[in-house]
Amino acid sequence: VSTQSTWGGSNKSEIDHICSYFDIDEDNSINEHDLQTSINRLSYFRATINIADTKLGGRNGTRSRSLTQRHPTLFPKVPLPDERVETILNELKRNINERRLSHHDVFKMLDANEDGFINFDEFRSGMDRFMKLSEPAKQGLFAFFDRQKIGMIDYPSFLKAMNENFINKKEVTEDNWEWQNAILGRLRTWCHQNSLMMEEVFRAMDTDFDGFVNKADLEKFLKDVLKVASKEVTSTRLDRLFKLLDQYK
């Protein structure tokens, strides 16, 4: 079903709004997976709201309002910081490895009603089988797993979150050149203090004396001469710095 189809006799903005609810993967079309996810999502939200409304003494005056208007926070939407998520996932992986469980095993254990999706209630109670987390931690972790921000976690989203590469993510998100410029500043200071010309600096960097300065030479020079901490010298930073220095050859 194409979300761009024209529905006669209906308001276009209303149709777009309805279609956006069902178009889970936001690809401007609604497939079987979108429909099944939407149905499960709606059923879960209605059940959750009915329980909440019952506790509040009924739904008088609420019938004309939408689900999100009456209950704007049906599921957690703010993920934990990456550093916190990384720590939790590492512990979770250790626990499931010790029990010789696969990611698919864990997903099935969390999917209590076996509908192919994990809602927040299932996630909240199911995580206790693997590790102890505070309520705020569970909420933030659920939001991290819920990549599509729909209040439901399917298996592809679960698998992607479990296999998140935080190291590459940290390097990719560093879009500025602050570190490289800071290193160049330290290099200029070192040259001035030792009264060295740029040609002499490159000779000093050539630690294996082969007449060329490669990345291994540069890394050794940074750590041994400029005393740059090893944890600062990531592959991405080194690549960028090498390209900058190459301009001075």
Image (cartoon, rainbow, N blue to C red):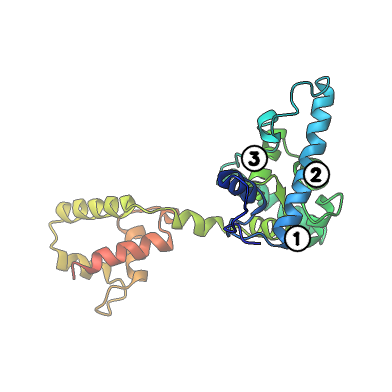
Q: On the rendered image, what quadrant is the C terminus found in?
A: bottom left
Q: Name the kind of residue labelled 3 in the image.
A: Gly
Between 197 and 3, the one nearer to me in the picture: 3
Q: Name the kind of residue labelled 1 in the image.
A: His
Q: Nearer the viewer, mark 2 or mark 3?
A: 2
Q: Is residue 202 left or right of residue 15?
A: left
Q: Residues within 10 Å of mark 2 (few under 14, many from 20)?
A: few
Between 90 and 142, the one nearer to me in the picture: 142
Distance from Cα at disc 2 to Cα at disc 1: 26 Å
In the structure shown, which secondary structural element does the residue marked by tag 3 occupy?
helix
Q: Residues within 10 Å of mark 1 (few under 14, many from 20)?
A: some
Q: Name the kind of residue labelled 2 in the image.
A: Ser
Distance from Cα at disc 1 to Cα at disc 3: 20 Å
Image quadrant in which you'd find residue 138: top right
Image quadrant in which you'd find residue 160: bottom right
User: Which of the two labelled residues, at mark 2 and mark 3, occupies the earlier sequence position?
Assistant: 2
The residue under label 2 is 43
The residue under label 1 is 103
Q: Nearer the viewer, mark 2 or mark 1?
A: 2
The number of discs equals 3
User: Which of the two labelled residues, at mark 1 and mark 3, occupies the earlier sequence position?
Assistant: 1
Query: How far across and how far down the image is residue 9, in percent?
Result: 63, 48
Query: How far across and how far down the image is residue 29, in percent?
Result: 62, 60
The residue under label 3 is 140
In the structure shown, which secondary structural element does the residue marked by tag 2 occupy?
helix
Residue found 50% across the figure and 56% down from its top:
169
Q: Is residue 192 left or right of residue 187?
A: left
